[in-house]
Amino acid sequence: QVHLVESGGGLVQSGGSLRPSCAASGFYSIYAAAWFRHAPGRERVFVVGIIVTGTTYYTDSVKGRFTISRDNSKNTVYLQMSSLNAEDTADYYCAAAFSSSDYVAEFGGKYNSWGQGTQVTVSS
């Protein structure tokens, strides 16, 4: 089992930056890690993802503003968020997929473990 713990969310002004992180623990072999977000009144949506080869995936609304990275020595994935705006306000969840079989980054059903979430609030 993999245990994921997010941290680093918070309150930031519009135009500001945050860098949430997701630390993984437990016996695991992770094929992909991703960040999803869930805003009030909306469905949970995919934000960014990264697979073992280093290939990354981004939803259009965050391209050029968000960057996903990983530190394998620390078993941690980071989400660098810049130029934040009110539309980015949401609970952000880290997810891990163990298998490459039929993997689609944007599909939440392909992820096996989820963190508890970290809140990001952008004030205008």
Image: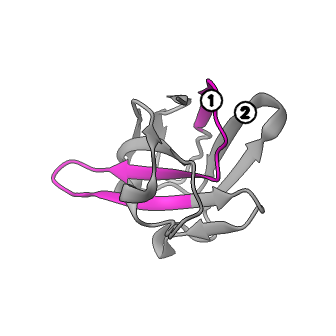
Residue 106 lies, with reference to residue 1, above or below; the image says below
Q: State the mark number for residue 107.
A: none
For residue 4, above or below residue 121: above
| Crowd rating for badge 1 (residues with CA inside 10 Å; few <14, some 14–19, many 20+) | some
Q: In this view, does 49 lie above or below 4?
A: below
Left or right of residue 103, residue 108 in this image? left
Write down the residue under mark 1: 23
Q: Residue at the location (79% across, 40% down)?
A: 71
Relative image position of residue 14 (x, y in whole percent): 46, 51
Q: Are marks 1 and 2 in contact (CB under 8 Å)?
A: yes
Left or right: 111 in relation to 8: left
Residue neighbourhood size for the residue with mark 2, other residues' Cα within 10 Å, grouped as few (<14), some (14–19), many (≥20): few
Label tally: 2
Q: Residue 72 in the image: state x and y as whole percent.
A: 80, 39
Disc 2 target residue: 75
Residue 124 visible in the current orientation: no
Q: Left or right: 19 with respect to 37?
A: right
At label 1, the amino acid type is: Ala
Q: In which quarter of the image is residue 116?
A: top left
Quote the CA–CA distance across marks 1 and 2.
6 Å
Under mark 2, the amino acid is Asn
Place residue 42 in its image quadrant: bottom left
- Determine whether the residue tagged by mark 1 lies in a helix, strand or loop: strand
| Residue 15 visible within the image | yes
Of residue 22 and residue 112, the one placed in the foreground of this image is: 112
Residue at the extreme left of the image, as rendered: 41
Please state if 83 lies on the left or on the right of 36 as rendered: right
The magenta-colored residue range is 20-48
Q: Earlier in the sequence, mark 1 or mark 2?
A: 1
What residue occupies the far bottom of the structure in this picture? 60
Residue drawn 58% across the image and 41% down it: 18
Which residue is at the front of the view, 82 or 124? 82
